[in-house]
Amino acid sequence: MNGSTEKTQYWNPYVGGILLGILLFFSFFLAGHGLGASGGVNRIAVAVEDLVVPEHVDKTPYIAKMAGGDRDPLAHWLVWEVAGILLGGFASGLLRGRVRLQTYRGPQISTRARWAYAFAGGILMGYGARLARGCTSGQALSGGAVMSVGSWTFMLAVFAGGYGLAWFVRRLWQPEA
Amino acid sequence: MAPYDLVGYFGLTGSYLIYIAIGFAFGFILESSGFGDARRLAAQFYFSDLRVVKVMFTAIVVAMTLIFWSTALGLLDYNQIWVKPTYLWPGIVGGLVMGVGFILGGYCPGTSLVSVATLKIDGMFFLLGHIAGVLVFGETVDSINEFWNSGHLGFFTLPELLHLGTGVVVFLVACLAIAMFLGFEWLRGAIYGKTQ
């Protein structure tokens, strides 16, 4: 868990950025659209919902568009991309010995509190990503690269929200001052 | 000319395999860049580790430049590319909510996936929260439908907004990215000292 020994194992961020940029370009070039994540998670969640309460899904317009009647919410590229992300992340972690059951947390916070904040943050992230019609991958990265105005204002808002609150919740991440 | 109709060329199964491959590369790059670790992602907001901004804006500039060149060379039909339509207000409010979720939870949706893939328990809680959040949105979106569709500007791009040529905007965004990298590095040095 020592930061200095782990740090050397990660790629230089500019190398990661260049590779990610090339991949993003390839996605646009081959398929005509960028990368995504939250939309795929959404569809997988809706697929489970459709197994449990299919009548309810049919009656709720937003999810019925994905899973109403005979529609299969999993028949969408985002779902397969999410499967690929999990496999790729696992492979990368495996190669560097980072696949290990553990909790990443700041030095001042308990493991249980970290889990609670992670869950709460996840709720906001899921809700916000649907409200904004995309997440950091689909809106900021992909929309940013094709210069969509809405994606750039979205990106500014994400950073504004994060930086705006960071000082007040510094106990979550920072060492004791 | 690109882009291609992947399902037409490769069939449904073939296109899914391509998306798994793209996702695999995406997940591999994210994890290798340190994005499976919430502490390093959150550190961006305390200026102690700047990899979020460096990876993200390098990627945007590289992809933007390659898209611009391949369009200029006639290899890519820019009109066939999916540019997300702008819905200004839900985008901004959703972005703010996500920024708050990011600093509390430590991940964004994509990075939480690679965290889960490497068995990080905090990432698993985050992903469960994310699933709860999208389900809540699906149940409640009808009551905020008007707001969700507000500020609709259609397919609206920076060159149209600024009345500048696409090449000029690509150049300006690249300059902005470099200025940001230098500015953030300066801030980190000012706060934590140069020896990091």
Image (tube, rainbow, N blue to C red):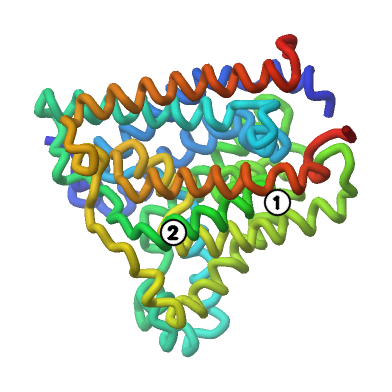
Q: Amino acid at mark 2?
A: Ala
Q: Position of residue B147 (x, y in %)?
A: 40, 72
Compare residues A3 and B124 and report the one nearer the observer. A3
Q: Residue at x 19, y 42 (%)?
A: B160
Q: Residue furthest top?
A: B195
Q: Chain of mark 1?
A: B
Q: Residue at x 59, y 66 (%)?
A: B133
Q: Is residue A144 left or right of residue A45?
A: left
Q: Distance of mark 1 from mark 2, alpha carbons?
A: 19 Å
Q: Is residue A19 above or below residue A107?
A: above
Q: What element does badge 2 sit on?
A: loop
Q: Residue at x 37, y 34 (%)?
A: A24
**Which residue is label 1 attached to?**
B104
* Residue A71 appears in the picture as rendered: yes
- The numbered mark at residue A132 is 2
Q: Chain of mark 2?
A: A
Q: Residue at x 16, y 46 (%)?
A: B80
How many callouts does the rendering have?
2
Where's the N terminus of chain A, which quadrant? top right
Q: Residues within 10 Å of mark 1 (few under 14, many from 20)?
A: many
Query: Is the residue under label 2 in contact with that under label 1 (CB below 8 Å)?
Result: no
Q: Position of residue B114 (x, y in %)?
A: 61, 42
